[in-house]
Amino acid sequence: MLAVSIGLYLLFTIAIGAWASRKVNSANDFMLAGQQLPLFLSTSALFATWFGSETIFGASSEYLEHGLLGVIEDPFGGALCLVLFGLFYVKPIYRMRVSTLGDVYVRLFGKKIGFIASLCMVPAFFGYTAAQLVALSLILGAVTGVTLIPGILISVAIVVLYTFLGGMWAISITDFIQTLVIIVGLIWVTVVILEEAGGVSDILAEAPPESFKFFPAPDFSSWGSYFGAWAILGLGSIPSQDIYQRVMASKSERVARRSLYLAAGCYLTFGLLPLLIALGAKTLYPDIYLENPQMLLPQMVLQHTGLGVQIIFFGALLSAIMSTTSSSLLAPAAILSENIFRQFLRPYSDRKMLWLLRLNVMAVAIVAVFMATWKANIYELVADASILLLVSLFVPLTAGLYWKKASKPGAVLSIFLGMGSYFILDQFTFAIPSFLLATAFSALGMAVGTYIKPKNPKCNPIIR
């Protein structure tokens, strides 16, 4: 019965994608839902940006092993990113009215820098999408017994289908429905766990004291790792097409900003529930935890709850992960289509662009499948994706928006020095994480390049 319910839910999701395809009449509809999303759809879409496998599977297992210090990256870093985007980035970026984040770099530094930034942006999503496919496969395996690789293939087929049909409209509508399922499912399972464990106080009493330690030990290395954990999602996901497309899909700048703040609050609130559930599950069923920490929650629900709870919980899991997966497919597809391959569409037409977007959704999915079969640690896949964006694109975007002298040579040196230094420094061990050092090199590159050849402030196109 549980497998049948899961199957019906997946068919329902595909049906939404087919229905949403009627609203897709242009490439802009496919990429940004025609910039028509109201507050409730925009908020749910932003909330679902990262609320997927890393929050429910990865973060819960990291919390049980390392306490709160192990989950600074997510959910705390994710919530920080939404707040920072609302405070400092949504106003200048939204007013540009361009289709992709790659176009933002074009406006800031010209076509060549936009092309380079787009090339840097796309690979980061392969690992992120792969992480979601691994998680979807784990769920299917828990429910039906299917192994990892067949589960990945089934998962990608479902998500690609409704994303292919409806684009951002399908993602936004399913995000809203899936957000409701996530909230109901997590609250329901939390209540069940609390009842069985005897309440919050009993769960907390069984937890090790270090589980609630929020600040690191007073030494340089610990604080370096601490700030690095905040930066991975908190800063690294700012120059990311997935958050950009969800912000730009809002029907106004005001709606976009309010949605970011509301989504940050929801993300932090409901992102903490899997941690509480995992702590209670470990206390009640330590044998399951020892088998596979990433599968603690689904195995606990399967073995120790009734059918109703199972349907709601696995519905919530599927909802969270599918919404994140669909977005991580569309984001690089938009960059590839708009900023890399569009120049080859001769003669150009919106119809050709729409089909190019859909074909690139499939292409990204194929690459992600190969990555998912190569590396199956969810938390590591997500962290790797955000780090690439942090070391290469965060500094040029921020400098381009807020430093009038920021120039093309500065942007080029920033991107290549940041990325190159990261690949070199990551081979060694330092007191400060290698990606933070690489981000500092990226900032140095921007400063040196701009000092050598500054930009004329009168030529800055940004609306401030």
Image (cartoon, rainbow, N blue to C red):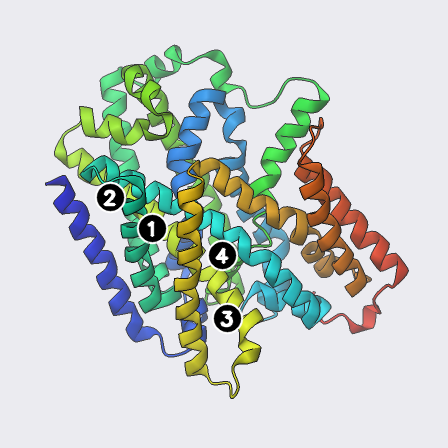
Q: Quadrant of residue 224?
A: top right
Do the residues bearing badges 3 and 1 touch, measured as CB atoms within 8 Å? no
Q: Secondary structure at mark 1?
A: helix
Left/right placement of residue 373 relative to residue 313 reads right
Q: Residues within 10 Å of mark 1 (few under 14, many from 20)?
A: many
Q: Position of residue 456 (x, y in %)?
A: 84, 69
Do the residues bearing badges 2 and 1 touch, measured as CB atoms within 8 Å? no
Q: Identity of the amino acid at label 4? A: Asp
* Disc ID at residue 337: 3
Task: Quickly name the residue at label 2.
Answer: 315
Q: Identity of the amino acid at label 1? A: Met
Q: Residues within 10 Å of mark 2 (few under 14, many from 20)?
A: many
Left/right placement of residue 286 relative to residue 422 reads left
Residue placed most toward the observer, 223 or 112: 112
Mark 4 or mark 3, earlier in chain: 4
Mark 2 or mark 1, earlier in chain: 2
* Disc ID at residue 322: 1
Q: Identity of the amino acid at label 3? A: Ser
Is residue 462 visible from the viewing direction of this image? no
Mark 1 or mark 4, earlier in chain: 4
* Disc ID at residue 242: 4
